[in-house]
Image (cartoon, rainbow, N blue to C red):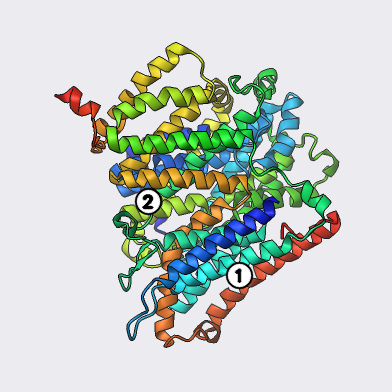
Amino acid sequence: MEIFPALLSVVTDPVLLLAILLAAVVGMIVGATPGLTASAAIAMLLPITFYMPPLFALAFLYVIGKSGRYGGSIAAILFNTPGTAASAATQLDGYPLARLGKAGKAMKVATISSIIGDFMGDIMLVIGVGFIAALALKLGPPETFAIYFAAFVVIGSVIGKSILKGLASALIGILVAMVGLDPISGEERYTFGSFELSNGIGLVPLMIGVFVLGEVFAQFEERRKTANPTEDDTREVESNKSFDDGNSLTWQEYKPCLPHALRGGLIGAGIGVLPGLGSAIAAFISYGEGKRRAKNPEQWGKGALEGVAAPEAANNAVSGPSMAPLLTLGIPGSTIGAILLGVFLIHGIQVGPTLFLTDKELVYKLFACGIFGIAAYGLIGYFGATQVARLILKIPTQVLYPLIFLTTFVAAYSARGSLFDVTVMTFAGFGGWLMRKYDFNVAAFVISFVLAKGAEETFRQSMLMSDGGALIFIERPIALAFLLVGLAAMAFRIRGIMKDRKLASGGLEDA
Amino acid sequence: MRAILEGIVLAVLSIAALWGAWQVPSASTGETWAGIVPFGAALGLLIISGLKLACVRRPATERAADSPIADDASLQVIGLFLLAVIYQQSLQWFGYLLPTALVAPVALYAFGVRSWIGLALSAVLCPLIFHIVFFELLGVFPPFGEVFDLLDAIRE
């Protein structure tokens, strides 16, 4: 078990522990601040990690992602505004509990359940990742391409409201990734004679633009839509002082929540392995399943502690297993995974099955950092969530967003010292805002951008193996199975949408 | 209307991408064509835009309920985007300090800060703090202004 020496190594490195602690605090604050996401924070901090050793960089950003997922529950419970999409399920019972004067209890249930879920996910990751990597080593280019294809289809069709827009976002991501010199033949593609474009579009400026500047534009639009843009948002928590009250949580109170947290952990871990599905789906499935099995379903939605435990455990359990496809196949399962892939590449580490041969120690140390990260945000959250909430209330958003706006430019420039990257970031930001505004899928766009090069390489290798015949993907059973998985996922999604449309007697447009 | 526009924009994008992929020279013997993946992706996008336009055929009453394409807030976002474009361009002409000193108060004002002291302070503190963090502590080489560089002038 490689994890034990890794845990020992991390615990004896005080600087690394301090970085994990700092990441836990940053992630929690970012996750709890409505409008800010862990993805945005990670994208913005990405250039700073260029100057850190690889383990520090990866651990810092990985723990921010974990802690950010948990931080979303603070905003959901106390501000009635989910800090992340996944914490919208926590809000259903979390905020009614806060209104009943039980915000402290709700926060503690959220914290304990998050820790349970996250630990379950990480244990599954540690146990399972080696097996997946060993299997992945046996896959040839056709099988790997089929996995990429399934990932594109699943990510494009399952996330978001519209399948067509999701798939279009994924295809646009692929097209943007094709800009530059072809890595095999050296031919120029979509460069329009520009020297800068021949180097391709950088991952870091694209991510900073889409996730951070795009979010700033979206927040700016939100603020302009309100009657008085100069008035800072007076969140409902101002009048809700209940997080001071009822802080203690007894074992008798948490005992009925435990089965929901354990079930949520299993649901989240299972969903986490599948690329693209993410925390929000896991949280809502866990909430629905928990309510179905609950002894008090009538209480759910009105302020049931179990209604906080179920989605929170699932939401956080996604974190660990979502790293499995990234580390073993090079396929990021989430936007945070896509950014972490960028960190690996920036530090010259090739992600994929061979990672477990070349950098096994680093991978297990990263897992160990994740486990310490859970402990860090758990402790801070259990004893200090209300202080974090107070801090967030003091952040003046009319100052915060302009500062983030300015930071994006210097962060994009710092990545490679290139002003062209700043241009890319600016236009990517506008594109990201447009995609959000018109319900296109930003996550599918970015993940596809990251996957495109690998998919192209394996596709062309397969074509060479088969002398240009596409039948190779059908003749090889594993490849065929993955192609069918992708198509089946899309078919299920279309069926689900059609069913909903039938119920609502709506049109076909959103399918 | 909005759905039609989205379909048309996707169609235009995909046709441009198809044309771009078609410009890639054909492969030499034993190699695969470098334009095959962009061409496939562009073709996929064209099919999606076609499906999108085909799905729009709905009753006029339903179409009327579509949200507007652009509202006042959207136009203001476009204004902020233009500020971003001017800022990134002026970094090339005037280096980091001067454009940041000018853009920081404008951005703060746009987001609702109305304190003149705060805005004035931001013009000094923002370039100073960002410069110290990124260009001094992290050691990134600052962009040099082709027309005029305040940092250069200060150093001289």
Residue lying at 33% horizontally and 53% vertically, measured from the top left? A346
Residue at the farthest left position: B156
Residue A318: tell me if it is visible.
Answer: yes
Of B128 and A138, nearer the camera is: B128
**C-alpha distance separating marks 1 and 2:** 28 Å
Q: Which mark is residue A457?
A: none
Q: Is residue A497 left or right of residue A442?
A: right
Relative to B80, residue A10 above or below: below
Q: Chain of mark 1?
A: A
The crowd level at tag 1 (other Cα within 10 Å; few <14, some 14-19, many 20+) is many
Residue contact between numbered discs 1 and 2, judged by CB atoms under 8 Å: no
Determine the secondary structure under disc 1.
helix
Give the percent coordinates (x, y) of residue A301: 79, 39
Q: Is residue A261 left or right of residue A417?
A: right
Amino acid carrying mark 2 in the image: Val
The residue at which mark 1 appears reads as: A486
Find residue B71 and report its image quarter: top right
Relative to A138, residue B134 above or below: above
Amino acid carrying mark 1 in the image: Gly
Residue lying at 73% horizontally and 62% vertically, measured from the top left? B55
Of A1 and A356, nearer the camera is: A356
For the residues beneath circles 1 and 2, the answer to whether they share a chain is: yes
Give the percent coordinates (x, y) of residue A482: 57, 74
Determine the secondary structure under disc 2.
helix
- Is tag 1's residue or tag 2's residue first in the polypeptide sequence? 2
Please identify the quadrant where the C terminus of chain B is shown: top left
Of A249 and A84, nearer the camera is: A84
Of B58 and A79, nearer the camera is: B58
Q: Chain of mark 2?
A: A
The residue at which mark 2 appears reads as: A343
